[in-house]
Image (cartoon, rainbow, N blue to C red):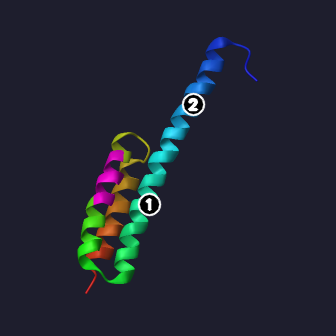
Amino acid sequence: MANIKSAKKRILVNQTKADRNKAIKSGVKTAIKKVSAAVEAGDKAAAGSALLAATSAIDKAASKGVYHKNTASRKISRLSKAVNQMA
């Protein structure tokens, strides 16, 4: 355990940031699952609205530094491709 005051503070700050990042990543995963479920069900309208919400969540996560911009772009691209390939 840290003995220096600044080190103790860093531990607390890092834990706070890790919790925040975990919550954001969890939200993104949930949004992605909603898109995937709509695609599996074949509901194009639901998939489109879920895609819009997921894109927003992923972009927000990337802007906060939770995801790298290329990772966010890749996730959005894969989701869009899945929705666009629906019959």
Residue at 34% across / 68% down in the picture?
79
Q: Give whichever of discs 2 and 1 has the lower sequence position.
A: 2
Q: Which residue is mark 2?
A: 14
Which residue type does callout 2 highlight?
Answer: Asn
Q: Residue furthest right?
A: 1
On the image, the x and y values in percent for residue 39 come to: 35, 78
In magenta stretch: residue 11: no
SS under mark 2? helix
Q: Choose mark 2 or mark 1, whichever is in front.
A: 1
Q: Residue furthest bottom?
A: 87
> For the magenta stretch, what is the residue range?
53-60
Quick one: label 1, few (<14), some, or many (20+) residues within 10 Å?
some
On the image, the x and y values in percent for residue 9 come to: 60, 19
On-image quarter of the C terminus: bottom left
Q: Which residue is mark 1?
A: 30
Quick one: label 2, few (<14), some, or many (20+) residues within 10 Å?
few
**Do callouts 2 and 1 mark residues in contact (Cβ within 8 Å)?**
no
Q: Residue furthest top?
A: 5
On-image quarter of the N terminus: top right
On the image, the x and y values in percent for residue 18 come to: 55, 38
